[in-house]
Image: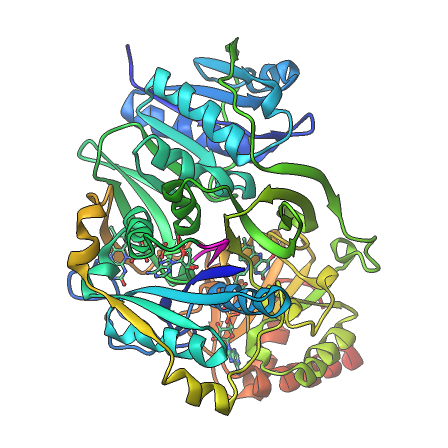
Amino acid sequence: MADTILVVAEQREGKLNRASFETIAAAQSIAKETGWQVEVVLPGSSIAALAQELAQKAVARVYALEGASLAAYTSDAYVFALKQFIHEKQPKLVLFPHTYQVRDFAPRLALALDRALISDSVGYKHENGKLLLTRQMFQGKFAADVSFAGDAPWLATFQIGAFRGEQAEAGSASVKNVAAAETTPRVVPHEVFQEAKQAVDLSQAEVIVAVGRGIKEQKNLALAEELAKVLGGEVAASRPICDNGWLPLERQIGSSGQTVAPKLYIALGISGAIQHIVGMKGSRTIVAINKDPEAPIFEIADVGVVGNLFDVVPALTEEIKKARAGA
Amino acid sequence: MKILVCIKQVPQKDVPLKLNEAGTWIREDVSYEVNEPDAYALEEALRQKEKHGGEVVVVTAGPARAQQVLREALAKGADRAIHLEDDKFAHLDSVNTARAIAAAIAGESFDLIVTGLQSDDFGAAQTGVLLAEILGLPHATIIIGIEKTDSGLRLKRELEAGHYQWIEMPSPAVLTIQSGINKLRYASLIGIKQAKNKPLRKVAWAEVEPKLGKNLQQIERLYVPVKQKKTEMVEGPPAEVARKVVEYLKNSARVL
Ligand SMILES: Cc1cc2nc3c(=O)[nH]c(=O)nc-3n(C[C@@H](O)[C@H](O)[C@H](O)COP(=O)(O)OP(=O)(O)OC[C@H]3O[C@@H](n4cnc5c(N)ncnc54)[C@H](O)[C@@H]3O)c2cc1C
Ligand SMILES: Cc1cc2nc3c(=O)[nH]c(=O)nc-3n(C[C@H](O)[C@H](O)[C@H](O)COP(=O)(O)OP(=O)(O)OC[C@H]3O[C@@H](n4cnc5c(N)ncnc54)[C@H](O)[C@@H]3O)c2cc1C
């Protein structure tokens, strides 16, 4: 029998996490090069319909790993059930999307299986029969190719957005129900919730001026506010700015904040960590101002200005005022 | 509460980094600092101690230079420190790092162990979770709120895109802390002075080596990532740069 790549899909409250399809796309791509086959497992309770949805992809089989203890996510129940399942199936490779949920249990699952987990990969290489996973290091300043040094099953997670979910090939697979091995979790989970309703809706803004730690002090936010004003845009920020309380959380862009896609996104003193980029890379035009020519933000910018934002921003604000007056 | 805080020393955020000759890591002649979420983990431990009493112990695994992060923690109010001191500790994967820390604290019983949610250099986001597995304790990740209850802990977990969840669990437990959970304090002058007399225990490589295994992953090569998008780079005096950007916004991007 062919070696298997097992994709661990994710659901919450009756909905699939779309990142699951990204991981299926990754698995299909690896399978093409290695000749391995792709299977999917979905842990949960009452998940037949979701398993059917996954089965619309070109994979060999979908397992619905059903158990009452898997109804609401806990690391204890997930590790227990998946450990048993993976131990029985002995796949060559186990792939996960690098979601908050996976971050919570996958390391523990790997160690329980006495195997390695290469986390937060952005791609892979198959070189002379060896599988390498590419991951960002030093906050995106470098990349590394990392290999497994021990025996399979090998475990790896893929960063959100590293593959495209809509590129997962369609097909039709059979669904097999499996009763999960169950344990009583030590963790008691309560409802998932959002904080009070947001006062601003950044997703509707056409122009966003976002500031990062390069702004140095709260009072310097005025620079960004000026620039946003002449552009008729909104001010937003990277996480550290909101952590400091300089701007409210509702103006934070990124994986733990808002996702936006304005016509114009100007990033001032933002390094371009992946958790920020996932929230704004859909912007039509990205202008980045950063004093470090190696800052990862320049990799996704349309226009990159290497310079001191305290010099460049006032000049830019003036120039835009002029352009507006002339237009 | 007796609390252990795991602190890693990482290259400073703003310093330029260069590849080493083997292309497997960076050149180490740079300045270092405390991994950012670890500073929040320490702050949270100090606050819990202030509320509930107890002791805060800090631990790091790394070369001699890493002692600095322990000194800073002692100056902020930690009671004592443990330094697994050897250059070799830097070459361990997350599993072995967790094993080494577990070995160094064998015989101590903590009510709570806190780590950062991930490091700013390798960034595996695994060490804390693995430590929980090794110690057989429950754990939770990406925590932005901690309340002690009669039976254990009530915790606020951050989830994606502005979602949150409260969970409860018994203690002892291991938590990985997210930046922003609290406001950081500065060390006071008195604190810095007192830190010099606080106990710092060194643990040698040989003491924990029997508990370590083979690294199950390997860095084949490190490199500067290849650009995926064509970026128009502009440099020069501010006024000229501003003109060029505005030109682009008007003519190419048509957003002005
Ligand atoms: C194959 C391989 C080769 C490596 N080679 C080198 C090298 O040559 N030089 C080098 O400097 N690094 C090297 N590393 C990095 C290595 O030391 C990692 O730092 C280690 O694996 C811990 O994982 P992490 O940094 O991803 O921590 P994460 O799992 O992201 O850290 C989470 C939290 O765990 C705690 N923590 C992590 N590490 C420590 C620690 N050492 N002490 C105390 N608390 C800690 C902190 O609270 C941190 O916030 C290598 C790693 C691998 C896998
Ligand atoms: C689970 C998780 C979730 C996260 N969620 C988010 C999120 O939703 N949003 C988010 O933004 N981050 C998030 N982060 C944090 C993220 O990893 C980064 O730490 C953060 O985005 C860095 O913010 P920054 O770019 O402002 O700061 P830094 O990385 O410190 O960068 C500051 C930049 O400013 C530049 N600079 C300094 N001075 C000047 C000057 N005078 N002129 C011009 N440039 C200057 C520097 O060169 C540097 O590039 C998350 C992290 C984790 C682990």
- Residue B212 or residue A52, whichever sits in front: B212
**In the image, what residue occupies the spot 33% across and 30% down?**
A113
Above or below A227: residue B89: above
Q: Where in the figure is residue B70, as x and y percent of width and height?
A: 38, 73
Above or below A74: residue A43: above
- Stretch in magenta: B110-118
Above or below B81: residue A215: below
Q: Can residue B32 be seen at all in this image of the molecule?
A: no
**In the image, what residue occupies the spot 35% across and 57% down?**
B225
Does the magenta-highlighted stretch encompass residue A66? no
Q: Where in the figure is residue B181, as x and y percent of width and height?
A: 62, 62
Q: Quadrant of ligand 1?
A: bottom left
Q: Quadrant of residue B33?
A: bottom left
Q: Where in the figure is residue A249, as x and y percent of width and height?
A: 71, 62
Q: In the rendered image, which quarter contains the N terminus of chain A?
A: top left
Q: Quadrant of residue B238?
A: bottom right
